[in-house]
Image (cartoon, rainbow, N blue to C red):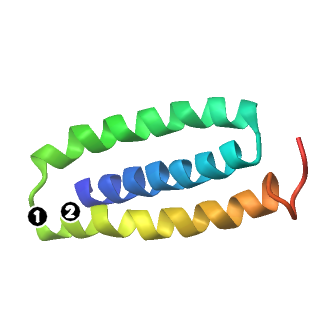
């Protein structure tokens, strides 16, 4: 269960960081504001879980959350706020 939480938190924080970068680059101020809260909350979960974790499964979960998170972020942003998606 801990590995799943770590994977999810890492996925969300990297997703949010990628989404944030695209928001800032494209001038989406409201989305950037809200997204900052998600980044902070996800980082709190990671910081709370990782120091107590040491298994290989939990380390793998941490490492795999990022690549999936960034690719998903790029895909979702392009289809929502990005150039091919709707404009706020």
Q: Position of residue 7 (x, y in %)?
A: 35, 59
- Residue where numbered disc 2 is placed: 58
Secondary structure of residue under mark 2: helix
Q: Residue at x 76, y 40 (%)?
A: 27
Q: Residue at x 80, y 62 (%)?
A: 79
23 left or right of 67? right
Secondary structure of residue under mark 1: loop
Is the residue under label 1 in contact with that under label 2 (CB below 8 Å)? yes
- Residue where numbered disc 1 is placed: 55
Quadrant of the image occupied by residue 20 = top right
User: Disc 2 to disc 1, how far (Cα)?
Assistant: 5 Å
Q: Residue at x 70, y 61 (%)?
A: 76
28 relative to 33, above or below: below
Q: Position of residue 44 (x, y in %)?
A: 33, 34
Quadrant of the image occupied by residue 18 = bottom right
Quadrant of the image occupied by residue 71 = bottom right
Name the residue nearer the viewer: 68 or 3: 68
């Amino acid at each position: 269960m801990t590995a799943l939480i770590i994977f999810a938190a890492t996925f969300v924080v990297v997703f949010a960081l990628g989404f944030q970068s695209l928001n800032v680059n494209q001038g989406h101020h409201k989305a950037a504001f809200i997204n900052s809260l998600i980044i902070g909350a996800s980082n709190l979960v990671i910081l709370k879980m990782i120091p107590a974790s040491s298994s290989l499964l939990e380390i793998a979960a941490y490492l795999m959350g990022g690549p999936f998170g960034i690719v998903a972020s790029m895909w979702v942003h392009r289809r929502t706020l990005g150039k091919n998606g709707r404009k706020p």
